[in-house]
Image: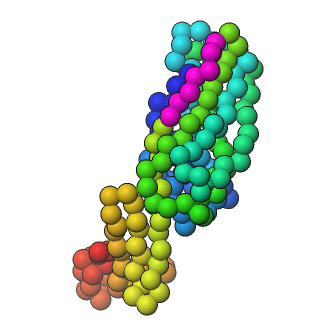
């Protein structure tokens, strides 16, 4: 069994996936999700997969064991655990997930995820996203609500560059 790609965040209510291992503190509760793949040439029987831990003690994860009677060779299963990130800090974190199948020893996978923090400065209407390597600030110049407004703006001769985000 193997996790080929790093775990990713899924927002529990909408099911929207965050990109490539990014977990933002602004979404306090999110699913730590991954695909476990049977990389052997034979089927695996009575497979149990569980979340062992995370390197940040300020992130709490609901414990749950997933059991699969059979995982065919080359197949993947999706598993996820709800984590509470509200007390975490931005940085690189390691997660440990264990799989065990009938007749084999435990297989521990340690994968890195990235925790970011996005905040809004109401006074300047600037969003700041903090991540391990630094911070990025974004300010929306103008936001439009409908296609009618967008068409009206372009009919008046405004250029696309007037809507850049920086």
Q: From the viewer's perspective, is 80 left or right of 127?
A: right
Q: Position of residue 66 (x, y in %)?
A: 72, 32
Q: Residue at x 43, y 50 (%)?
A: 92
Query: Is residue 19 rendered magenta in the image?
Result: no
Q: Which residue is situated farthest in the front direction here?
A: 57
148 or 31: nearer the eye? 31
Q: Find residue 70 and report its image quarter.
A: top right
Q: Residue at x 48, y 56 (%)?
A: 115
Quadrant holding the C terminus: bottom left
Query: Is residue 106 rendered magenta in the image?
Result: yes
106 or 162: nearer the eye? 106
161 versus 16 height, above or below:
below
33 or 152: nearer the eye? 33
28 versus 65 height, above or below:
below
Q: Find residue 90 and report its image quarter.
A: bottom left
Quadrant holding the N terminus: top right
Q: Find residue 144 and report its image quarter.
A: bottom left
Q: Position of residue 58 (x, y in %)?
A: 59, 57
- In magenta, the rendered stretch is 104-110
17 versus 137 height, above or below:
above
Q: Residue at x 47, y 74 (%)?
A: 119
Q: Visible in this render: residue 19? A: no
Q: Residue at x 62, y 21 (%)?
A: 106
Q: Visible in this render: residue 42? A: yes
Q: Position of residue 165 (x, y in %)?
A: 32, 74
Q: From the viewer's perspective, is 160 left or right of 142?
A: left
Q: Position of residue 59 (x, y in %)?
A: 60, 54
- Give the colour scheme of this rendering: rainbow
């Amino acid at each position: 069994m193997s996790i080929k790609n790093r775990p990713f965040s899924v927002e529990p209510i909408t099911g929207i996936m965050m990109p490539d291992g990014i977990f933002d503190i602004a979404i306090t509760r999110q699913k730590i999700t991954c695909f476990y793949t049977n990389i052997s040439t034979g089927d695996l029987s009575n497979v149990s997969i569980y979340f062992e831990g995370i390197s940040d003690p300020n992130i709490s994860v609901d414990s749950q064991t997933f059991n699969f009677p059979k995982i065919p060779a080359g197949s993947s299963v999706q598993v996820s655990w709800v984590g509470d990130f509200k007390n975490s800090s931005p940085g690189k974190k390691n997660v440990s997930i264990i799989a065990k199948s009938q007749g084999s020893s435990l297989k521990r996978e340690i994968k890195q995820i990235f925790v970011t923090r996005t905040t809004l400065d109401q006074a300047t209407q600037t969003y700041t996203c903090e991540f391990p390597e630094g911070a990025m600030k974004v300010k929306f110049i103008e936001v439009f609500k409908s296609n009618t407004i967008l068409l009206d703006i372009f009919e008046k001769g405004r250029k696309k560059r007037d809507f850049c985000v920086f």
